[in-house]
Amino acid sequence: MKVLVAYDGSEPAGHALTRAAQIAQRGDAEVTVISVVPLQASGPRSAGPIMSGDVEEHGRELDEAVAKLKESGVEAARIEAVGHPAESIVDEADRGKFDLIIVGHRGAHGVQRFLMGSTATRVVTHAHCDVLVVR
């Protein structure tokens, strides 16, 4: 089973990592962690969308997630992405032919969630594989 875990450093994302480790420890699961640097729409005079997150910060979050999984005895791959978080997660799940996506019930970006909707809700709505939302 191929498992994709969305991680943004938030507490719910940490719970998603824990659940991924439990699933991997019970069976033959291949775990990959994805962190997405979100894009934000820009003003009318801009050349296009701008990153609303720090690429280095997301890299550190991925390192942290992979290390937490390793502490649990689970080896994990990592994916750094830039874009709309839900779209990037769903696209990567399709591209990598993942069987399961695990997401926390809410992420670290509260204002963006209020304006754009929950990443977890969008992943559940658009994913072509099973999605586990962890509280």
Image: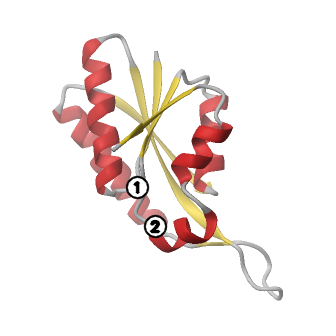
Q: Of all residues shown, which one is farthest toward the left?
A: 71
Up/down of 83 relative to 72, above or below: below
Measuring 64% from the left and 34% from the top, which residue is drawn there? 127
Callout 1: SS = loop
Q: Position of residue 90 (x, y in %)?
A: 63, 39
Three-letter amino acid code of the residue under disc 2: His
Q: Do the residues under discs 1 and 2 have CB atoms within 8 angstroms?
A: yes
Tell which of 17 and 45 is nearer to you.
17
Q: Secondary structure at mark 2?
A: loop
Tell me: residue 1, above or below residue 128. above
Q: Residues within 10 Å of mark 1 (few under 14, many from 20)?
A: many
**Quarter of the image with the C terminus in it:** top left
Q: Which residue is mark 1?
A: 8
Residue 34 in the image: above or below residue 27: below
Query: Which residue lies at the image location 29% right of the left edge and 47% below the top edge?
Result: 14
Residue drawn at x 24%, y 42% as measured from the top left: 67
In percent of width and height, residue 82 lies at: 60, 57
Q: Determine the CA span between mark 1 and mark 2.
A: 9 Å
Between 95 and 13, which is closer to the camera in this rendering? Answer: 13
Determine whether, in the image, residue 31 is placed left or right of residue 11. right
Q: Which residue is mark 2?
A: 109
